[in-house]
Amino acid sequence: MILLNPGPVNVSERVRTALTKPDICHRESEFSVLQESVRQGLLAVYGLSHDRYASVLLTGSGTAAVEAMITSLIPQSGKLLILENGVYGERIEAMARAYGISFTAVKHEWGAELNAQRIEESLQQDTTITHVGVIHHETTTGRLNNLSMVGILAHRYGKILLVDGVSSFGGEELNFEEWNVGAIAATANKCLHGIPGISFVVARRELLDQTDFQPRSVYLNLREYYRQQEGGGTPFTHSVQVLYALDEALKEFHEQGGWRARHEKYRQLAQSIRTRAQELGIKMYLEGGMLAVTLTALRLPANLSYQTLHDHLKAAGFVIYAGQGDAGKVMFRIANMGEIEKVDIDRLFLAIKELL
Ligand SMILES: *Cc1c(COP(=O)(O)O)cnc(C)c1O
């Protein structure tokens, strides 16, 4: 089954085989070695200096990492400006509400490009804002948000930038220093081609080192993970086999040429999806602006329901992804992360053509 949903993704045999390594206890030295290897491998994805940044590992899906970042790095006195143009920006708002974190939002239509002027006005008008929360790739629509613009504005107004990079980390350009990234949350099983179960936050050490914090959560307290992982431990039972697989996936990632090579592979796959769709008269959901290389949102052809398309493709060995909310009636998505080759895309479009 070829998974064309935005995670979990198809993995290599090498990564899958890593799951069968020996059982280990997360309180033993061999676990510390494994954990440190993954933490370093994650920093190396964007060549980050160990002195300035640290990665913190959690057992949980991507949302766990986003929630740990949002609830652990904004102090009680802080206020979050949330930039929303899809489901995942709205999810950060839901987290702020659930934990009673003070926030304000700049809301856009799903898929719209972030409006620099409106963001700057909010930053100017509300001086109580301390942090800016943004999604890098808004997987709802395939919109790649302009992180450079947001980062420069956050820097100009002295705000800390918190990024949901769950579907971009490892597959898109990320310029941590220039774009002023304070922290970014991501997961093992999207662009890094690992197994679901481990997620992580890469953050500036100066943010993790702050001590004047009242924790909002026990399990998602990022600072406690950081403190213990720096000493080779970890507060709770990790999904150790999934960590083995992530370690292997990171080795594979670096051997294959790092984020630039992965980005280029994704770019070519996405290009072929977009060209093939156009040949069949299937329109792009977004027109213009910055698009991610990991996912393409397409308009459903007239008189074709998502369910019919989905079921036909599933019978041919492909899983595609519905649009979320109301968009589900007019749109479907094809992601191209994971162990996918161009021949798979060719076969996919033969199956779509057959149905049409
Ligand atoms: C997939 C995704 C998530 C959520 O990941 P889960 O692993 O399902 O919790 C969060 N943000 C973005 C941008 C995503 O693409």
Image (spheres, rainbow, N blue to C red):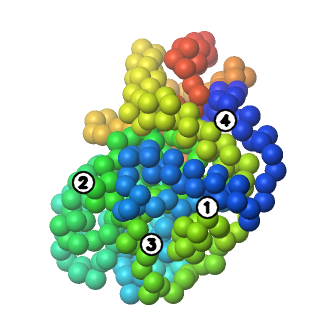
Q: Label 4: state its secondary structure.
A: helix
The residue lying at 38 percent from left, 33 percent from top is: 260
Task: Give the distance between the C-alpha atoms of the residues marked 3 and 2, in whole angstroms.
Answer: 20 Å
Lower sequence index among marks 3 and 2: 2
Give the residue number, with chain letter if any, for mark 3: 208
Q: For the view shown, which residue lies furthest in the front direction? A: 29
Lower sequence index among marks 3 and 4: 4
Give the residue number, with chain letter if any, for mark 2: 178
Residue type indicated by callout 3: Leu
Give the residue number, with chain letter if any, for mark 1: 58
Between 102 and 211, the one lying in front of the other is 211
Q: Residues within 10 Å of mark 4 (few under 14, many from 20)?
A: many
The residue lying at 79 percent from left, 40 percent from top is: 20
Is 169 rendered above or below residue 254? below
The residue lying at 60 percent from left, 78 percent from top is: 217
Task: Give the distance between the C-alpha atoms of the residues marked 3 and 4, in whole angstroms.
Answer: 31 Å
Instruction: Find out whether the residues at labels 4 and 1 contact each other: C-beta distance under 8 Å.
Output: no
Residue type indicated by callout 4: Val
| Quadrant showing the N terminus | top right
x and y percentages locating residue 107 in the rendered image: 35, 62
Lower sequence index among marks 4 and 2: 4
Callout count: 4
Residue 325 in view of the camera: no
Task: Give the distance between the C-alpha atoms of the residues marked 4 and 2, in whole angstroms.
Answer: 33 Å
Give the residue number, with chain letter if any, for mark 4: 15
Between 240 and 83, the one lying in front of the other is 240
Task: Give the distance between the C-alpha atoms of the residues marked 3 and 1, in whole angstroms.
Answer: 15 Å
Lower sequence index among marks 2 and 1: 1
Residue type indicated by callout 1: Leu
Indicate the quadrant where residue 207 lies: bottom left
Lower sequence index among marks 3 and 1: 1
